[in-house]
Amino acid sequence: MCTFIKSQDRHFMKMLNFIKNRLNLIEKQAKINQMTPVHYPPITPETVYAGLAEITAQKGNRLSVVTLENTPSNNSYMDLFANLVRQHGKHPAPYYAKILGASPRAFDGAIRCMSGISAHDWINEYLRLVACDLLEHTKLTFKEIGHILGFSSSSFSQFFQAYQHMQPYQYRSIKQNNWNRGYHFD
């Protein structure tokens, strides 16, 4: 009987040592995991928008034709989203969520997480950058620019006023004539 108890004690001690070693290993892993988290810079429209392509009458007037390929952000989801905005222009965020196979809420959350702004604001900021470039570097009419960006004929000026805080004609004259009359723009 005594040998049986000693045998059980040895087995118990081995199990106890095994558990202690496992706990030590888990504690070491927890300390490693508590290292400083990596912070990635937000992926904003400014980081992916590459500017205008050479615009010719033969190429047409689609947004993907007048803009250069986006600069890669090293995030495939954001790159895909940015390229969709470049190809399709002004559409609501749920439109892009559907194309990417996500619910609108999950899509908006993912874009917020990676960029710091909502998908709606990301789309509008991207289109604002393109609109500013088109106004400054081309002689296209406001109606043509609105069409390229995917706006109805009357809504482009309203969009530009809301996001750039001036009318498109004011922005164009300031940029093309180097006039700065107290307007704030990027």
Image: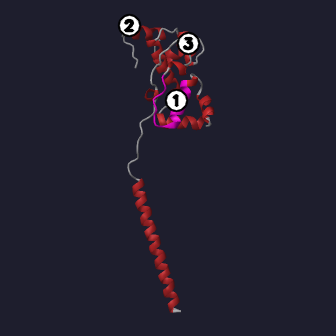
The answer to whether residue 52 is above or below residue 181 is below
Task: Give the CA separation, mark 2 to mark 3.
Answer: 29 Å
Q: Range of the magenta residues?
A: 68-86
The answer to whether residue 110 is above or below residue 134 is below
From the viewer's side, name the closer residue of 107 and 89: 89
Q: Residues within 10 Å of mark 2 (few under 14, many from 20)?
A: few
Asked whether 110 falls inside the magenta stretch, the response is no
Provide residue 110's location: percent of width, then percent of height.
Answer: 53, 37
From the viewer's side, name the closer residue of 178 and 76: 76
| Lower sequence index among marks 3 and 1 | 3
Provide residue 174's location: percent of width, then percent of height.
Answer: 40, 9
The answer to whether residue 173 is above or below residue 63 is above
| Lower sequence index among marks 1 and 2 | 1
Q: Residue at x 59, y 30 (%)?
A: 96
Provide residue 159's location: percent of width, then percent of height.
Answer: 53, 17
User: Which residue is tagged 1?
Assistant: 82
User: Which residue is tagged 3?
Assistant: 58
Provide residue 115's location: percent of width, then percent of height.
Answer: 47, 34
